[in-house]
Amino acid sequence: MDGQTAVVTGASRGIGAAVARRFADEGARVVVCAREQDELDAVVADIEDAGGEVKGMRADVRDEFDVERLMETAARGSDGGIDVIVASAGVFHGSPGKSPLAEDAYSAFDDSFRTNARGVFAAVKEALPHLADDARVLVPSGKIAREAKSGYGAYAVSKAAVEAVVRQFAAEIDQPIGVVDPGAVATDLTGGQGRDPEDAADLLHWVATAAAPETFDGGVVGLKEFKKATA
């Protein structure tokens, strides 16, 4: 990824933070954002201490003007445009498996969509004028978006909407965009259950650099495809 510019939203923790560190380790110039300034600063410091090139910006993906500034900042320091977008910002207002949809507050339902679905829409929409011709746009998601399971409430519904946003953009833009499903990952959203976020970063790095565009554009790629390609 030497010479590439990558933007990672939701980079203060979990998959976003792991992906940002991995991309920087691979030589990318990484532009990261999150709502939590202190946690974001810690990730930026980790990357800088490891010798990586990083720019951190406090930005809320629910605010399109924040996202617009984020993408403009990333593009100004790039060599030919933004090469990779990882739209990983997300929220879960509840506990995995213990949050029935009927018990979700309207405010929680609305914020799940504003952050998870509209946030991805904003990230892609605001990045489009700045994307390199061969850029890739990756959106982490999970099986809960496609297979209903009790207790995942508005989070599951919003992730289904996220994947619909990806499919629609795939039908309309030139650059490949796809869903990346790393399975259960140990993050705040999963209550710490699942594989290490660094394992997910391996998958995202492969999709960002080595996977054939047709394997993920408009679709879902996951550990099965990654393991088959790298066996």
Image: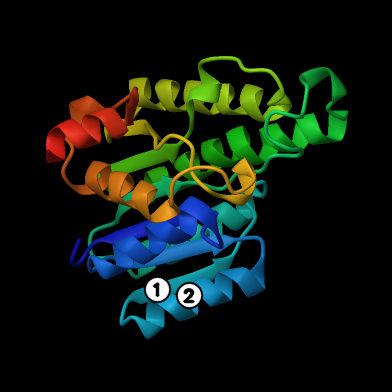
- Label 1 is placed on what type of residue? Val
Figure quadrant of residue 181: top left
**Color style of the picture:** rainbow
Q: Quadrant of the C terminus?
A: top left
Residue at the disc numbered 1: 54
2 or 1: mark nearer the eye? 2
Horizontal arrangement in the rendering, residue 172 relative to residue 155 (left or right): left
Give neighbour class at mark 2: few <14, some 14-19, many 20+ (Cα, 10 Å): many
- Label 2 is placed on what type of residue? Val
The reply to whether residue 133 is in sight is no
Residue ID at (31%, 61%): 23
Question: How far apart, in angstroms, are the residues tagged by discs 2 and 1?
Answer: 6 Å
- Residue 134, given in percent of the width and then of the height, sits at 20, 44
Q: Which mark is residue 178?
A: none
Q: Are marks 2 and 1 in contact (CB under 8 Å)?
A: yes
The reply to whether residue 116 is in sight is yes
Q: Earlier in the sequence, mark 2 or mark 1?
A: 2
Residue ID at (18%, 37%): 211
- Residue 35, given in percent of the width and then of the height, sits at 66, 60
Residue at the disc numbered 2: 44
Q: Quadrant of the N terminus?
A: bottom left
